[in-house]
Amino acid sequence: MGGRRSRGAAALTTAFLVGLTTTACELQDVTVVDVEDVIIVEAYALVGVDTPDPTVRRRLWAFVSRTVDGEGSWDIPPAEVEVVRSDGRRFVLEPVDDENCISDGDRARPGVCYDAGAAASRLRPADQLELTVRLADGRTLGGRTTIPGDFRLEQQATPCGVPPNTPFEVRWSTADGASAYVNETRIDGLDRALEDEGIEAPEELFLLGLSLSASDTTIVFPSEFGVFERFDLNQELAVRLQRGLPEETQAFVGITATDRNYVNWARGGNFNPSGQVRVPSVHGDGSGVFASAVLRRFGVFAGSSEQTNALPRCAGTF
Amino acid sequence: MRRLVRSLARGVLLVLASGMAAPVVAQTGTVEVGTVQGRVHDGEGAAVSGAVVRIESAGGATRSVGTGPLGSFRVSPLEPGTYEVAVVALGFAAYEETLTLVSGETIDLDVTLEARAIELEGISVEAERSRERVRFEEIAGVTVREMELVDLQFVPGVGETDPIRAIEVLPGVVSTSDFSASFNVRGGSQDQNLVLLDGVPIFSPFHLGGLFSVFNADMIDRVELLSGGFGAEHGGRVSSVLRIESEAGDGDTGVDAGISLLASRAAVGGAFPAAVADALGQSTLRFRASARRSYFDVLFKPLFDFPYHLTDFQAVVEGWSPGGNKLTVTAYSGRDVLDLTRLEADDFPLRIDWDWGNDLVGLRWTHPRRGGGSLDVKANVSRFRTGLAFPDFSDTNLQSGISQMQLRADLETRPSAAWRVSVGAGVERMAYDNVFATGGTRFAGGDGTGTLLGTHAQASWTRPGQWLLEAGVRADAWLPSPGQTTIELAPRLALKRFFGPDVAAKAAVGRYTQFLHSLRDEEIPLGLDIWVLAGDRAPHVVSDQVQVGLEGYLGADWFWSAEAYLRTFDGVVAFDPSDDPSDPTDDIMAGDGVSKGVDLFLRRERGTVNGWLSLSWLRAERTFPDPFSALGSGVEATYAPIFDRRIDADLVLTYPAPWGWEGGVRWNFGTGTPYTRAVGSYAYHSPRFLDDGGRLRWTGSDDEEGFDGSYAVELENRNASRYPAYHRLDLSFRKTMTRSWGTLVPYVNLVNIYNQRNVLFYFYEYEQSPPVRSGISMFPVLPTVGLEIRF
C-alpha cells in the first residue's frame, strides 16, 4: 500500500511538473503573419549511366515554385528557363507536365516543371553550365554548376550475386569535382524473406547512404545504407540488415557523384526553429539550387540457389 | 581602434611621468619612513586570509589593510613612532600588540590567531569590506566582481545554488536563455570565458546540455568574475576569467548534505592525521570532498525508465608547511549519462547511449616571500569528452574531446612599498579530437595538437592614495599541429588616479589572444561545446580592448562603479555550412567582431538589507562570410549576435524575511535579443536518382505539420529582428535552524514569480492557413525546494 502510495505521489509530482512546464512553455500569443513571395528554383543536370547497359540517360530540368502562403493560391509567373554550356550551346527548358519533375504522389506541390527534353542527351560529365530563369514579372534568377567527372564502379557486372547474409564493400573510382556520392538502394522481397524471422518489412525498401568528399569512394552494402532512416525504420529490420541481404532478395544500388551545390542544398545550414535553412546556389530575385550529378548503378541478387551462384560474384564481397 | 589604443597609452604615460616626480622629491627628506609587514596564520600554520590588520599611531591616525591569500600584509610608509597593531578575523580572537618603529626600519610580524568559538558580529563584514577595499586601493586595471557563497545562495535559481548561473546578475554578463548556463561577457563569445577551478581550466562546466553548471556549492568559497582589464598574467581567453575557489574548510570534521529537485549531495571535510601531515612536511593537512548525483532515474524506476543522470565528484586538499608554504590539490570528475538503450522501442526506437563530462586534477604549491609576494607553481591536467554510442550500429562514431596539460610558475616580488613586480612562464599542451562518422562516411571532424609557451612580466607602481600604474607584457608562442607557429606580443597598461580616499578613475588598454574555439552554435540554447584549436583549420583570436571608468565608496557601506569599454575581436569562428567536403581544412569560417558598452554597478555591502544593482548597455557586432546571401558567394554579413542584449539590468537583494527566514530577491530586465525571422517557407524536395530519373520527392506528407523536414525556410537578414524584452522576478527563502547535533537549512526558490512568458523561440508556420507565428517560452513560474544539513 505504502509503495503504491509513494508511486502514486511520484507520478502525480511528475505529471504536475511536466504539465506545468509544457503548458506554460507554449506562448499564448499566436499572430497571423504575412508571407514574403520568394521564387524557388530547383534545377538539376543528371548524367545517368546504367552499367553495363550502354543506354545513357541524361536529363536537365528545373522545377520553379514559390514560398507557400497557406491560402492555396499557388500562381507562379510564366518563365523563360535556359541553360548555357561553357562552349556556348544553349539548352532551352520548356514547360512540361509536372510528372517530369515531381514524382506522382507529390504532384499536389505547387510549381511549374521545365525540361530540356532530348537535348539533354548532349550533356557530358565535367560540362560547365549556367542557368538563367527570367520570370514574366521581371524577376531573374541564375546559378552555375559543373557536372562531376565520370567514374567507374569496381562492380562491372550487373546483376551480380552475393551469398545471403554477406555484406560487401562497393567501391568506385574518384569522380573529379564531386563533393559527395549519394548512395541509394531499393531492396525487393524483404517481406517474404524475413517473415520466418518474425521481422516486419515492406515488400520494397528504399535506403539512402552517403559518401562525403570526392575521395570517399566506398560503402558497405547494405549495412551502411539507411543512415538517414535509422530513426524511422523498424529497428529490428535495421539491425537485421547489418548482417547483409537475406536469402532470396534482390536490390538495385545506385552510386551518384554530386556537385557541391547539391551537398549545400541537401545538408542545410544554421539552426532556425522555423525550419531547415538551405544554402542556395541559385541567386538573384529568389533562391534555389542548380546541382548536377553522374549516376551509375547495378543489381544484386542474394541467395544460395544455382541461379544466383551462376551470376558473377559481387566485387568486394567479404 | 589602434589609434585609440595608442592615444590612450600616450596619455597614460604622460600622467605617469607627472605622478612619479612627486615621490622622488619626498624621499630627499632626512627622516626615512618605515614598514610593518608580516604574516597572519592560525595555530596550525594555515594562513588567515581576509584578516584586517589595523595600525593606529599615537596620534590616533589609523591605517587598515587586509591579508592576502597567504596571510601576508604590509603597511608602508609609516613615520617613526609607536603604534598599536590589532589583527581581527572571523572566527578568531583579536590579536593586539604595541610596537615602536624607528627611522627606516622594517618590522616583520608573525601573528598567530587563536580560534574562538563565538564569532563576533561585524568582524566578517569588516573583513569583507577590507578585501573589497584592498582591491580598490591596490589594483588598477582588472575589473573584479566577487560573490561569496552566501551571495550565491541568495540568488534564486532552479534546484540548487549554481555559481555560474549566479554570475548572470553581474554587470556586463549576458545570458541568452533560461535553458543555458553559458554566458557572454562584454560582447565576447561564450567560448572566450576562461573558467578556472582553483586555477585549473575546465572546458565545458555544464550539466544537462548547459542547463546547470557542474559546480557543487558545498565546495565553494567564492567566485570571482574578471570582466576586463586583465593583467599580463592572464592568457588563454580574451573575454573574461571566472575563478571558482574551493573551500578546504578549517580542518574540523564535518558533513554538509543536501537534497534538491536536481540532485542529492554530500560533502565531508576534516583534517588528515598529524602523522600523515608530518610525513608530507606539513603542519596541517585539510581536505574537503563532495559527491553529487541526480536521482530521478532511481526515484522513477518503479514507474518508468528515466534515462538521464548526472554525477559529480570534487575534492580539495590543502596543506600548510611550518614555513607558510601552501600546497593545494584539486580534483574534479563529472559525468552526464543519457542512456536510451533500455527504453521501450515504442518510446524511443533507436538505442543510444550518450555521455559527457569533465575531469581535472591540479597541484599547486605557493611559497610566501618575506614582505609580501609569492612564488606560485602549478601543474594540472584537464579534459572534456563526449561520446554518442549506438550499440546496434558499429559504423557510427560520434565523439568529441579536448585535453590540456599545463605547467606554470609565477613569481611576485615587492622590492619596495611602491613597487610590485611579477614574472611568470608556462607551457600548455592541448589536443582535440572530434569525429562525426556514420554509415561509412565522415560527416565532420578534425584533430590536432598545440603547445603554448607563454611568459609575462608586469610591474605595478603606486603612490598610495594618489596613483596606481600597472604595465606589463605577455608573449605567447603557439605551436599548432597542423599549422604554423604564431608569436603574439600582448602589452597591457592600466592606470588608476585617486581623487581623495573614496573615488578613483581608472583606465586600461591591452591586447589579448586565444588559441582555441568552441564551434557550438550559440543560437541553440542546449548543446555541447565542440572544441578546436587554432591552426590550419581555424585562426587564433586577437582582441584589443580599452576600458575607462570611475569607482568609489559612498561611506563605508556603498561601492559604486561605472566603466565603459571598447573591444575588437579578430579571428572569431563559426561552422561554414557551405564548406567543400573534399577539403578537410575549410569547414570553419573566420570572422571578426566589435563590442562596446557601459557597465554600472552599485553595491551595498553591509546592513540588514544589502545587495546590488547592475545596469549594462552593450552593442555587439559580428562579421562573417554569408553563404546564404542572395548575391552569391564572397559576400559578408554584419549582424548583431544573439547575445547583443542592449540593456540588461539586475537588482539583487537579501533581506530579513518574517519568522526567522532570510529572503533573496532577483529582478532581471533585458531588452530583446536578436533572432533571424523566417519570411517564407517552401516545400523541400529531394531528388531520387536510382530509379526515378532524378525526379523530386517531397520529404514530408500532407498529414504532417512543421518540424519534419518537409518545409525549408527563407530568412531575412541575419538577426534583423528582436524578441520582446525579457524580465523575471525570482525569490528565495532560507531558514537556518540550529539543533544540538548540527544545522538544518530548508530553502524555497520561486523562479519567475509572475509567470512572465519570456520568448525562447518564435516559430513561423507559413504552411498553415492563415500563416501564423507561434512560439515557446522560457521558464514558467517554477517553485523548487531543497534542504541542507550540516553537522
Image (cartoon, coloured by chain):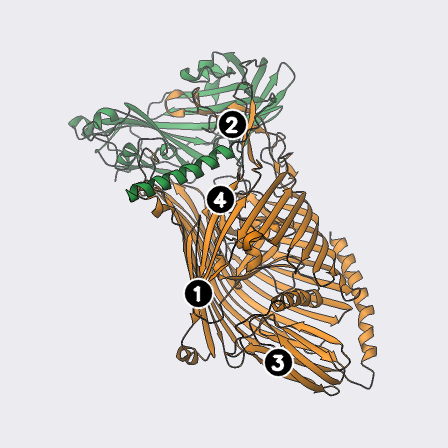
Chain colours: A green, B orange
Precedes in sequence: disc 4 or disc 1: 4
Residue named by callout 3: B370
Mark 1 or 2: in front is 1
Question: Pointer 4 indicates a residue of which chain?
Answer: B
In terms of image quadrants, where is residue B625? Answer: top right
- Residue A224 lies left or right of residue B197; in this view the side is left
> Are callouts 1 and 3 both on one chain?
yes
Residue named by callout 4: B527
Provide the secondary structure element on which disc 3 rests: loop
Marks 4 and 1 in Cβ contact (< 8 Å): no
- The numbered mark at residue B740 is 1
Mark 1 to mark 3: distance in Å? 44 Å
Precedes in sequence: disc 1 or disc 2: 2
What crowding class fits label 3: few (fewer than 14 Cα within 10 Å), some (14-19), or many (20 or more)?
A: some
Provide the secondary structure element on which disc 4 rests: loop
Residue named by callout 2: B712
Mark 1 to mark 2: distance in Å? 66 Å
* Rendered location of residue A299, percent (x, y): 29, 27
Precedes in sequence: disc 2 or disc 3: 3
